[in-house]
Every structure is written in C-alpha cells, then in structure tokens.
Image: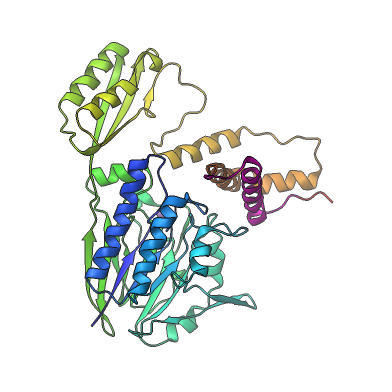
Amino acid sequence: MSKFAHITDCHLGSWRNPKLRDLNLQAFEESILISIKEQVDFIVITGDFFDVNIPQLAPVKKAVEIMKNVRDLGIPIYMIYGSHDFNTANISMIDILHSAELFIKPTEFQFTNDSVKLRFFVDKKTGAKITGISGRRVGLDKEIYEKLDRKELELEDGFKIFLLHKGIQEILPLDIQSRDTIPISLVPKGFDYYGGGHIHRRIEKKIGDGLIVYPGPLFGSTFQDLEETAKGEKRGFYIISFDNKILDRKFIEINVVKILYKEIFSQKLNSEKLEDEISRKISELEVKDKIVLIKIKGKLLGKRSNIDFAKFSLDIFKKGALLSFINTNNLSTDETKAVVVHSDNKIDIEREIFRERIKNFQVDSSLSTRIKNQINSKLIGIAGEKISTSLLDVLRNEKLENENTSTYDDRIASYAKSVFDEEGHFYDN
Ligand SMILES: [Mn+2]
C-alpha cells in the first residue's frame, strides 16, 4: 500500500497581521510534519502555495526550510500553481523554488494544432502517474481545458492523479458558485484521484470510478475564510492510501487556533444604544486565546464616527483574546450613499463596486471607433470587472524589505502591464 498527502491553498505570506501570518505558516508546518509522521510516499499541493507572486521573505525562508527537509527525507512534492502564485509575465517566487528543485511541477503541456497535450509524471517509488493544470489569475486556463486532448489522458493505464486549481460547476455547492469554473465535461475521465485547489471549502465527491477532493485551505487567507472556520468549517488536508485503486481517504484537521465569530445587529439604534449593545455582547463572550471576529450589521441612526470601535477591539484584547477584529462593513448609516453593495466579503464587495461604477462609465465620444470598440469589449461589463480586480490585485503588492522605490515602481508597473498583456492591448493604428 502507498500513501500520499494532498495539501492546498496554503497562501503562505498572507495576512498583514503578524500573528495571523505566523498561524498560517504554523498550519503548513503542521501538515507537513504529520505527513512525514504518516510516512507518505509523496505530497501533492494544488496551488495558491504563496498568497502573492512576490511574498515577504520571512515566510519564504520558512517554506524553503520545510520543503528542503521534505526533500532530504526523499519525499517528492508535486505542485501545480494557483491563481495567487504567479504572474505569467514575470518571475515569481514559486519559480525560484521550482528552479531549486524543491518540488516537481507536473504541468508540462504542448500546444499542437489547437490541441493541448499534457504529460504524465511517474512517481518513481509508487508508479502513480500524475498530471495537472495550473490556475491562472484571470482564468485563461479555461482555454487550456477547452483544447485539452482528453482522449489520450483517458487511455493511459495505471493509477492516475489529475491536479487542478479550478472549481467544477457540477461539484461546487450552490452558495459558492462563481464565474471562474469549468463544466465537468472539460475534465478528463478515468482518473483515480482528482486533487482540487482554489475552492476555500472542503468538498469530496465520487466522479466516475474516481474521487475528487478539495481539501480547502489549511488556515485561510481572508476574514471570510476565518468566519467560515468559526462557523464550523473544518480546515486541514487529506491522506490518501492506494495500491492500484484508492483504498482509503483520511481528512486530517489542522486547528492552530480557536476562532470565535459573533454578529451584532443594530435595528435602527442610535450610537449610544449600539455601544451598550456591543458592550453587553462582548461581556458575554469567552475570548481567552481566541481570534475574535465581530460583525456589526444593520442600521445606525447617526454617525459611525460617534462610536469608537477600536476601543471595543481593545476591550476584547484585554480580556485575553489573541486577536480581535470588528467589521462594520454591513452597518449602514444615513451618511452611507452612492454605491450600494450587498456582499459582506472583501472580494465580492470590490467586484460589486467595480460593477456599479462601470455601469456609469461613458466612453469619450471623440475617440476613434477602433479604440471605442476595444474599450467596450475590454473595459465594460464582466471584462471590465476582471481587469479592474486584476489591477487592484497588482496594487496590493507591498514594497519589500530593502526594495527601493524605483525598483518597486518598476515592479508594479510591469505587473500592471502584464494584466493588459494577458487581457488584450489597446491599439489605434
Ligand atoms: Mn486559494
């Protein structure tokens, strides 16, 4: 019997808050230590290993140490890239780790006459045949799936593993359907194991005679992830046993910290009453050593600035919480006007704001028809939302330690340019 571990969406380097950043790294380290203890023959990682393509160096150092240890023990890591890991026009940190042979990237493909041929990587020790497709930031991988020579992959014999960083429409629960998915018809059939990344929720399902598993993130990279964890979503990874078929699957929970989530609803309270309500709710909470997430929803009569939310955060901290965050994105006041959004997580809010703003965008009528057409096809509607969110992602890259301003400016400008390179240039001749 052989065994492998399936880990995904580590998002190493994510979180501005150092404690959260460390907890995230700790979750990764634990998953690897358990995999070693369980004597797995190899490890697969299905993307979003890093949170951004050029992460801070401290988490990179830690990741390299852990991976080197795994390599020295003779355990290969097969890793595909996720939408967060890389940037097609530039070298990313993950490429450097790949150059150092810290992992194997089983995603080699060949474009021939409009068809894409994928190569299998055979794991020496177990004979497992592994292949996969990396995820891309703007979903250009869909084209690869559409042109994929599935027949050839299906005809291959042996124990086969397919790695993907993408949601599959028919498999996702309804509440997390997104545009960035593919139909199951584009996925080659007949594999024993489909290892999924990108979806921050745990899913396992039968697919033909095989099994598809999305382990979900080890810790999470957004407050939405932490909120779901607090509400009972378990985080961790899988250990799969197999010979020529899958024999067993085991979910290993990784629980590096307790998270508490509390909603406080303001039904047209004035600031004094809401403050009382928040104090009362906080006094009831058992917060010791936990991450505490408070979401304040509803309507406030008066100004938001009348309430010192930071003080409440400090109160929670003083009661022994590890960290505390108060989210008032869903608290509306009469001051709140302009764009109305209904989502309550950062990514959807950004997308909705772009959508609303783009609706009101007017193309300058003095421009040439050609440019106007390009703007209409690339900057309006869904295409416009995509390009805006990709550019915003670029602007999220912070200056690195020891990076000087002009290098930083050049780096950001070149990332921004690559967004346009991927999604289309604007020409006027
Ligand atoms: Mn992810």
Image coords of residue 303 (percent x, y): 40, 14
Tell me the residue at 22%/27% (across/down).
318
Q: Quadrant of the N terminus?
A: bottom left
Considering every residue shown, the one lying at the far front of the view is 402
From what the image shows, is residue 407 above or below residue 158?
A: above
| Foreground of the two, 143 or 224 | 224
Query: Residue 405 colored magenta?
Result: yes
Specify the quadrant of the image occupied by residue 3.
bottom left
* Residue 8 sits inside the magenta stretch: no
Q: Quadrant of ligand 1?
A: bottom left
Give the x, y percent position of residue 125.
34, 84
In this figure, what is the number of numbered marks? 0
Residue 412 appears left or right of 95: right
Q: Is residue 395 left or right of residue 9?
A: right
In front here: 149 or 390?
390
Up-down: is 137 above or below 362?
below
Name the spot of residue 165 as percent of width and height, x first.
Answer: 44, 62
Q: Which residues are magenta?
A: 400-426
- Residue 10 position within the rendered picture, expressed as x and y whole percent measured from the top left: 37, 56
Task: Answer left or right for 38 relative to 79.
Answer: left
Task: Report which quarter residue 185 is drawn in.
Answer: bottom left
Where is 265 relative to 427, above or below? above
Residue 114 higher or lower than 367, as above or below: below
Residue at (59% x, 35% y) in the render: 359
Question: Residue 228: in sight, yes or no?
Answer: yes
Q: Main secondary structure of the magenta part?
A: helix
Residue at the spot 55% in from the left edge and 37% down from the top edge: 354
The answer to whether any part of residue 168 appears in the image is no
Front residue of this view, candidates 211 and 368: 211
